[in-house]
Amino acid sequence: MRVGFVMNPIAGMGGRVGLKGTDNKVAEARARGATPQAREQALRALTTIADLNSEVSFLTWESPMGSEVLSDAGFDPMICGAPLQAVSTPFDTSAEDTIAAATKFVEKAVELVVFVGGDGTASDVGSVLEDTQIPMIGIPAGVKVYSSVFAVTPEDVGSILRGFDETESREVMDINEESYRSGTVQPEVNAVVKVPLSPQVQSAKASYAGDIDRLATGVAEDITADERLIILGPGGTIERIESELGVEGSPLGVDLYHDQTMIGRDVSETTILEAIHDHGGSHILVTPIGGQGFVFGRGNPQLSPSVLRQSEFSVVASKQKLDRLGQLRIDSGDPSLDESLRGWTRVRVGRYERRLMEIT
């Protein structure tokens, strides 16, 4: 199988530092201490297909957009091109480079394109593949990973490639990052592409209406009586709980609440870790992403493995949302941590009512 492989080396950099994306924000992300995440995600995926070395022939772009990480994973890729300008660091690449790579892959008649990035990278690749029958699959590495063209986890790429014989059409979506940073989600369908048919490909993000008033009241009562630092994740359900507490949160960010006061709004991973150190015990409150079921690893990268190891967490959701989710998912970026968190958990769905759901 001839497979095109391209990596956006700066994908995901803006997440843990609270930027909700990296579009036009690379310098600010670096100033806040962000480091590239894409290479680690790519290696997680590539190690699962190391045994397919003789069956998969990779075509790729010069480092830092694919060749080096493929070589490090034990493959001998064909290099088909290089970034448009001289590259001394991962920060010198652009969307035009991704588009150029995808275009070359089409010319070379690859059978599949694997990309590493988020919804922005997916849109770049999809803009080229939309008018072809060549399927694509994403290794999740961006801040926004809402499109239904990504593997559930990087490790799932191995299963997808092994069982790849049929495709289906999926939408590539992206969100305007400036609006996203201001708390408004404006998704746009940028392309419709072919994707391998597999249960290891994630569903698109979905929104569900549901009665959460009693849930919000009950959770707010418990938070008010809790002496710990409360770390509030993003989402409409959490926003409703914050309203019940009488505070204004950031619906798409992570907030900090302690002693009946909002002490941090739209905070970064570093700020969360400092607050945990200052206050001792901490508790994370999250709601799953509709349609996907992720509680960690999509839309809340500030809740990093370092944060999760030092905190307890609980999940809240409307009954209607859970009815449409067969399971909950975690992809924190640390497979060993994810494994330790898997199992059955009680999801709060009402003032007192809870429902058992499995985290996979």
Image (cartoon, rainbow, N blue to C red):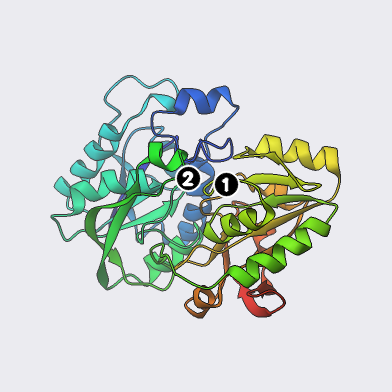
Badge count: 2
Residue underneath mark 2: 143
* Picture layout, residue 146 above or below residue 5: below
Location of residue 350 in the rendering, given as x and y in whole percent from the top left corner: 65, 75
Quarter of the view holding residue 60: top left
Task: Tell me the quadrant of the picture where the N terminus can be found.
Answer: bottom left
Residue neighbourhood size for the residue with mark 2, other residues' Cα within 10 Å, grouped as few (<14), some (14–19), many (≥20): many
Q: Foreground: 97 or 30?
A: 30
Left or right, 109 with reference to 261: left
Dot 2 falls on a residue whose secondary structure is loop
Does the image show residue 66? no
Dot 1 falls on a residue whose secondary structure is loop
* Picture layout, residue 60 above or below residue 28: below
* Three-letter code, disc 1: Pro
Task: Tell me the quadrant of the picture where the C terminus can be found.
Answer: bottom right
Residue underneath mark 1: 301
**Mark 2 / mark 1, whichever is N-terminal:** 2
Location of residue 245 in the rendering, given as x and y in whole percent from the top left corner: 69, 54
Q: Foreground: 179 or 62?
A: 179
Q: Are marks 2 and 1 in contact (CB under 8 Å)?
A: yes
Quarter of the view holding residue 160: bottom left
Q: Foreground: 13 or 287?
A: 287
Q: Foreground: 218 or 155?
A: 218
* Three-letter code, disc 2: Val
